[in-house]
Image (cartoon, rainbow, N blue to C red):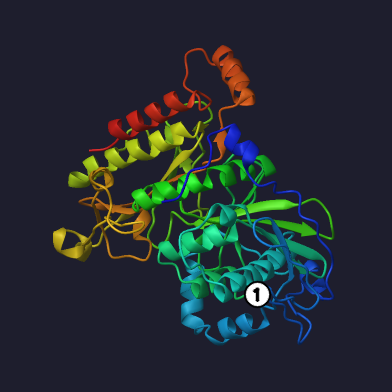
């Protein structure tokens, strides 16, 4: 069983420093990507992660734990494989139709150069985990490892790479699929969020994976809590918490690092989704002006937009309430707040309704050997449809609901306590998001209970 890291603030203090890796350049031409002309790596220049006791030509590596620096393998072969498997014209037209409201980051887009670097870097980073697959549950060293891969003009860091590789495998996600979706096989899609944060939001070209830029402090929080997060998912494999799949840094021309996370998209598969919501269980700043009738924009609405509506889960309601209680209790113990319940609706077809159209997935999973009676009792069983992203999907009698808890990195520290005091004075009779973790968890669970049947 994994041993949890200490709680905040000690856990954050002991987390790996994510800004301390020393980097150097490599003889590789990625300037075309930076200028928005695509990816054309120099022929014959491939790097590999050094095996124990061996030295890789042109690369330096420190033993785990701690920073590693290697020359990145080329995504050229992967690009050819993905390109050769592209489908016909009808598929591409149908694919574009399902992207309404998302914006393809093609040449000429201001973020095209950056996303090309992200794609090339992630292709190489995933190749490392494919060449060196995890052999067992992650150790503390795996949670601390920092691997930096060097390209001409940019460097991509992979934080806690072995731990995330093991987590992806435990979710049944093939590294080849992960690499193909995030690599240079197709342009990322930009998602214009209604969030107040300054983060950038992207989707992989197949909309399966969600990428979001994060601040260094948020990354430190995520890494500090990662061992306990993994433990929670082991104990509750159908937890509503978003599945975090990777944490990375990108530095261009030795400039300031940009950190970003990768997670499984809650809204996947996106076809036929009619409404999307971001729920915090409060009122202040929780209204979004809906898109005009017939607009192609995909907007994520908020609490006040949901007034008068109900989530009809039928017999699945009790499971949902219980899992919300378990997940928010976990986040409360981490001293975390300001997370959101993402939710989307999709009308069921006739042949998708009724007990005969779904499969029962049992969540009894063992970390090593048999589980203790306490762990078995804590498991929930959940009725899930047979769909590609069943972890975040729950069927009611008439609707299919996409559900997931996201934004797990805001700690209730001094800054948030001062913000709470200020908002108490400014909004004396209204509810707002910045409250204690215990109150935040309780209020969100109460919202769910009041809006489900």
Up-down relation of residue 123 to residue 449 (above or below): below
Q: Evaluate whether residue 306 shows in this view.
A: yes
Residue 131 falls in image quadrant: bottom right
Residue drawn where x is 37% and y is 60% of the image: 272
Residue 74 falls in image quadrant: bottom right
Q: Evaluate whether residue 292 shows in this view.
A: no
Residue 15, horizontal then vertical, whole percent: 63, 43
Residue 279 falls in image quadrant: top left
In front of the other: 153 or 329: 329
In front of the other: 395 or 345: 395
Residue 331, horizontal then vertical, whole percent: 45, 36
Residue 285, horizontal then vertical, whole percent: 54, 30
Residue 99, horizontal then vertical, whole percent: 51, 63
Seen as rendered, the residue at the extreme front is 53
Up-down relation of residue 18 to residue 134 (above or below): above
Give the residue pinned by disc 1. 51
Up-down relation of residue 23 to residue 37 (above or below): above
Residue drawn where x is 74% and y is 59% of the image: 110
Label 1 residue SS: loop
Q: Quadrant of the C terminus?
A: top left
In front of the other: 169 or 267: 169
Say left or right for 118 vs 300. right
């Amino acid at each position: 069983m994994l041993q949890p890291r200490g709680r905040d603030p000690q856990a954050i203090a002991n987390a790996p420093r994510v800004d301390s890796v020393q980097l150097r350049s490599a003889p590789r031409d990625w300037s075309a990507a930076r200028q928005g002309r695509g990816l054309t790596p120099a022929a014959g220049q491939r790097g590999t992660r050094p095996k124990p006791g061996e030295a890789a030509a042109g690369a330096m590596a420190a033993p785990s734990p701690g920073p590693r620096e290697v020359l990145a393998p080329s995504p050229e072969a992967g690009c050819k494989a993905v390109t050769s498997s592209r489908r016909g014209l009808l598929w591409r037209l149908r694919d574009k139709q399902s992207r309404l409201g998302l914006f393809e980051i093609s040449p000429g887009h201001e973020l095209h150069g950056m996303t090309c670097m992200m794609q090339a870097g992630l292709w190489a980073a995933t190749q490392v985990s494919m060449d060196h697959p995890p052999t067992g549950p992650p150790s503390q060293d795996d949670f601390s490892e920092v691997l930096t891969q060097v390209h001409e003009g940019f460097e991509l860091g992979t934080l806690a790479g072995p731990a995330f590789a093991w987590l992806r495998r435990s979710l049944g996600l093939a590294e080849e699929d992960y690499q193909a979706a995030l690599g240079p096989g197709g342009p990322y899609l930009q998602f214009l969020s209604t969030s107040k944060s300054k983060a950038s939001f992207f989707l992989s070209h197949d909309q399966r994976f969600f990428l979001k830029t994060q601040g260094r402090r948020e990354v430190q929080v995520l890494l500090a809590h990662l061992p306990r997060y993994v433990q929670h998912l082991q104990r509750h494999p159908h937890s509503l918490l978003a599945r975090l799949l990777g944490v990375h840094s990108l530095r261009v021309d030795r400039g300031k690092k940009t950190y970003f996370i990768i997670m499984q998209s809650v809204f996947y598969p996106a076809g036929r989704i009619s409404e999307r919501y971001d729920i915090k269980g409060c009122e202040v700043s929780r209204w979004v002006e809906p898109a005009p009738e017939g607009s192609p924009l995909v907007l994520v609405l908020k609490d006040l937009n949901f007034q008068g509506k109900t989530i009809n889960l039928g017999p699945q309601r009790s499971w949902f309430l219980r899992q919300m209680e378990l997940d928010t209790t976990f986040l409360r113990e981490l001293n975390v707040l300001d997370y959101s319940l993402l939710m989307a609706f999709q009308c069921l077809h006739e042949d998708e309704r009724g007990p005969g159209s779904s499969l029962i997935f049992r969540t009894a999973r063992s970390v090593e050997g048999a589980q203790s009676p306490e762990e078995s009792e804590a498991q929930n069983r959940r009725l899930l449809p047979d769909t590609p992203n069943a972890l975040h999907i729950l069927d009611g009698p008439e609707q299919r609901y996409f559900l997931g808890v996201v934004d797990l990195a805001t700690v209730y520290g001094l800054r948030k306590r001062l913000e709470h005091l200020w908002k108490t004075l400014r909004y004396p009779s209204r509810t707002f998001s910045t409250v204690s973790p215990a109150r935040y968890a309780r209020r969100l669970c109460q919202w769910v209970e009041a809006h489900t049947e």
